[in-house]
């Protein structure tokens, strides 16, 4: 048993709720199962540091000289 197989077993045991639901969609016999689990988790829940990255972008965003307040507000909303 290689390291990824061991990690896969641990992930399968600890995932719960909606995270565990993704396991039903995956092929258990795939040699890339460990990576497939992580890719599915990222698609379903986003990147691990996504919230932190959004806060950083928000904090560093400054109003441009030619940008109106309304334009600046619209640029901040998606962050």
Image: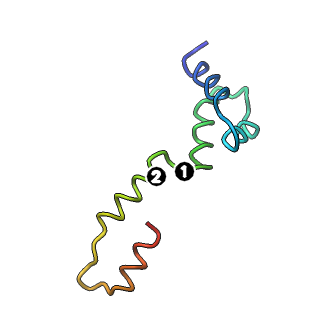
Pinpoint residue 42: horizontal percent, then vertical percent.
Answer: 56, 46
Q: Which mark is residue 46?
A: 1
Q: Residue furthest right?
A: 24
Of helix, strand and loop, which one carries label 1?
Answer: loop
Foreground residue among 55 and 28: 55
Pinpoint residue 65: horizontal percent, then vertical percent.
Answer: 23, 83
Q: Residue furthest left?
A: 65
Task: Count every numbered label the image shows and give the total.
Answer: 2
Q: Which mark is residue 4?
A: none
- Which residue is painted at 39% across and 54% down in the image? 53
Please state, as top left, top right, bottom left or bottom right, where the C terminus lies in the image: bottom left
- Which residue is painted at 36% across and 65% down in the image? 58
Is 55 above or below relative to 20? below
Label 2–label 1 contact, CB within 8 A: yes
Q: Residues within 10 Å of mark 1 (few under 14, many from 20)?
A: few
* Structure colour scheme: rainbow
Foreground residue among 78 and 35: 78
Image check: 63 left or right of 7? left
Foreground residue among 7 and 77: 77
Image check: 54 left or right of 35? left
Please state, as top left, top right, bottom left or bottom right, where the N terminus lies in the image: top right
Of helix, strand and loop, which one carries label 2?
Answer: helix
Q: From mark 2 to mark 1, how far is it between C-alphas?
A: 7 Å
Image check: 37 left or right of 3? right
Pinpoint residue 54: horizontal percent, then vertical percent.
Answer: 41, 59
Pinpoint residue 35: horizontal percent, then vertical percent.
Answer: 58, 33
Q: Quadrant of residue 4?
A: top right
Q: Which mark is residue 50?
A: 2
- Which residue is painted at 73% across and 33% down in the image? 27
- Which residue is painted at 62% across and 36% down in the image? 36
């Amino acid at each position: 048993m290689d390291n990824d197989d061991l990690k896969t077993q641990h992930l399968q045991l600890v995932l719960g709720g909606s995270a565990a639901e993704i396991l039903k969609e995956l092929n258990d016999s795939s040699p890339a199962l460990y990576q497939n689990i992580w890719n599915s988790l990222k698609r379903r829940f986003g990147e691990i540091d996504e919230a932190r990255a959004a806060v950083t972008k928000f904090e560093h965003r400054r109003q441009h000289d030619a940008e109106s307040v309304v334009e600046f507000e619209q640029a901040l909303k998606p962050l």
